[in-house]
Amino acid sequence: MTAPWLVVSVHDVAPGTAEACRDWCATLDLLSVPASLLVVAGPWRGGALADDPGLAAWLQQRCAGGDEVVQHGWTHVAPPGGPAWRRAVGAAVARGAGEFWTLDEAEARRRLEHGRDALGAAGLVADGFTPPGWLASPATLVALRSLGFGFTTDHGGVRDLRTGARHRAPALSHRPGTFGERLGARLMPAVAARRARADRPVRIALHPDDLDRPGLRAATVSAIDAALTAGARPCTYGDVVAAPALAREGAG
């Protein structure tokens, strides 16, 4: 059986978080693990990608070295409006970041095109899209397909937008500042190891704000190391949807 895959994503890459994202990538380099870099190209936390040519150059270098860029929303902030139940879910799950959770197709397409254009102007190309908070409306999925995106991700896995295949793998992620932060940090290495030993794929999501909390970096490194020790093969999301042998792991 093909070894299970391991994808480590660095979320919320933007000018305002660049230092922390570089820090996470340096840690991944020591582990010989590529990064799926989720870039917020629009205005967020005081800056946009267009305002930071140094960040764009760094991202180009990372991609040349084996990482990938994944489009990650436009403003990373939930807009007003939409059904009340969706607003409630978005507030609870994404803590105000569910930008694409309530959008209709026209608005989703507009924001997706803005993000794609900004990435292109920075010399970057993203085949995939991860909505902020991993929350996307059905209309967003329609817009993604119409714009030719190759894949998207949610809490439960990776969706190949060209073939319709879904590769199941829950995202392991910290929740800094929440009641369950310490328990989650203790569980992450054990869950990663258990999934890899069972030949099941592993996804680990890193956020810049994780580095503000003591112990979360160590827990993350332990989880990645546990998955690698159990035989998981590090790769990017693009590798998963591009390689049939990898993609079979966790498909369903």
Image: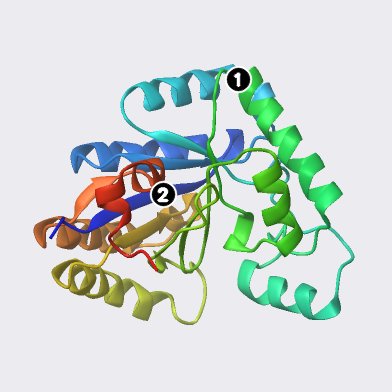
Q: Residues within 10 Å of mark 2 (few under 14, many from 20)?
A: many
**Circle 2 SS class:** strand
Q: Quadrant of residue 16?
A: top right
* Residue 136 visible in this rendered orientation of the protein: yes
Amino acid at dot 1: Ala
Could you tell me which residue is drawn at 86 percent across and 68 percent down?
82
> Which residue is label 1 attached to?
122
Disc number for residue 247: none
Image coordinates for residue 135, horizontal then vertical, percent: 64, 63
* Residue pictured at 65% horizontal, 46% vertical: 145
Rate crowding at label 1 as few (under 14), some (14 to 19) or many (20 or more) other CA atoms within 10 Å: many
Q: Earlier in the sequence, mark 1 or mark 2?
A: 2
Q: Quadrant of residue 123?
A: top right
Q: Give the left or right position of residue 61, taking residue 105 as reference.
A: left
- Is residue 43 visible to the viewer in this orientation of the structure? no
The numbered disc on residue 9 is: 2
Give the mark count: 2
